[in-house]
Image: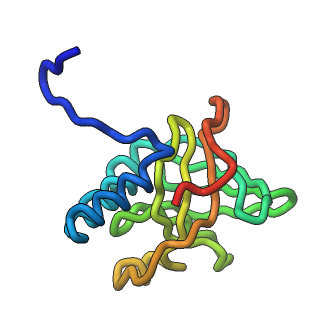
Amino acid sequence: MGCLVECRWRAPDRLRPVVVALAFIASGGLALNAVADDFWMAGEDLRATFAGVTIDGHYADGRHFTERYGSDMALDYSEGPRQATGHWSVVSGTFCTIYEGDPSGGCFRVARVGSNCFEFYFVARTEDQVRRHQDGKPGWTARGWVKGRPATCRDEPIV
């Protein structure tokens, strides 16, 4: 079957880490940034995906949570009896969830790893910190999916 406009092969989600590693090796390391940048959701995609939706999810330790991202950047969080409010933002390519009077939020790189599955990787505790620097490898924190739609998540992190 031919392509009418543009043909680009895209690795299936489960193979993307392997493709990243192979591209890195084949290019002597030069392609890593381009492929890695493609892996993470970008600013406009983050806004379009999360504004006005609620996600359900779970952390690495198995705790479940629900978080609503208002179109007005308001944030409502619940985890069992714990409730929090705050705001969300997109800063320097990260998705930030900042809670009022609660330092447990932060800024995360986000990977779409299925049609309705997102993985969140911690980068910095505050919006100011993420603006100043993003040192080190982001650490896997949580997985979530848009509430009310079938989740397409696997059990283990993709990176």
Q: Is residue 74 left or right of residue 7?
A: right
Quarter of the figure with residue 147:
top right
What percent of the width, then of the height, locates residue 157? 60, 57
At horizontal 44% and vertical 56% (from top left) the residue drawn is 17
Colour scheme: rainbow
> Is residue 29 something that shows in the picture?
yes
> Is residue 71 something that shows in the picture?
no
- Front residue of 147/39: it is 39
What percent of the width, then of the height, locates residue 127? 44, 75
At horizontal 33% and vertical 58% (from top left) the residue drawn is 22
Number of on-image labels = 0
What percent of the width, then of the height, locates residue 91? 37, 67
- Front residue of 94/54: it is 94
Residue extending farthest right: 81
Residue extending farthest front: 26
Residue extending farthest top: 1
Which quadrant: the N terminus?
A: top left
Q: Relative to 149, say whether 60 is above or below.
A: below
What percent of the width, then of the height, locates residue 88? 51, 60
Q: Is residue 5 left or right of residue 65?
A: left
At horizontal 15% and vertical 29% (from top left) the residue drawn is 6
Residue extending farthest left: 5
At horizontal 66% and vertical 31% (from top left) the residue drawn is 148
- Front residue of 155/146: it is 155
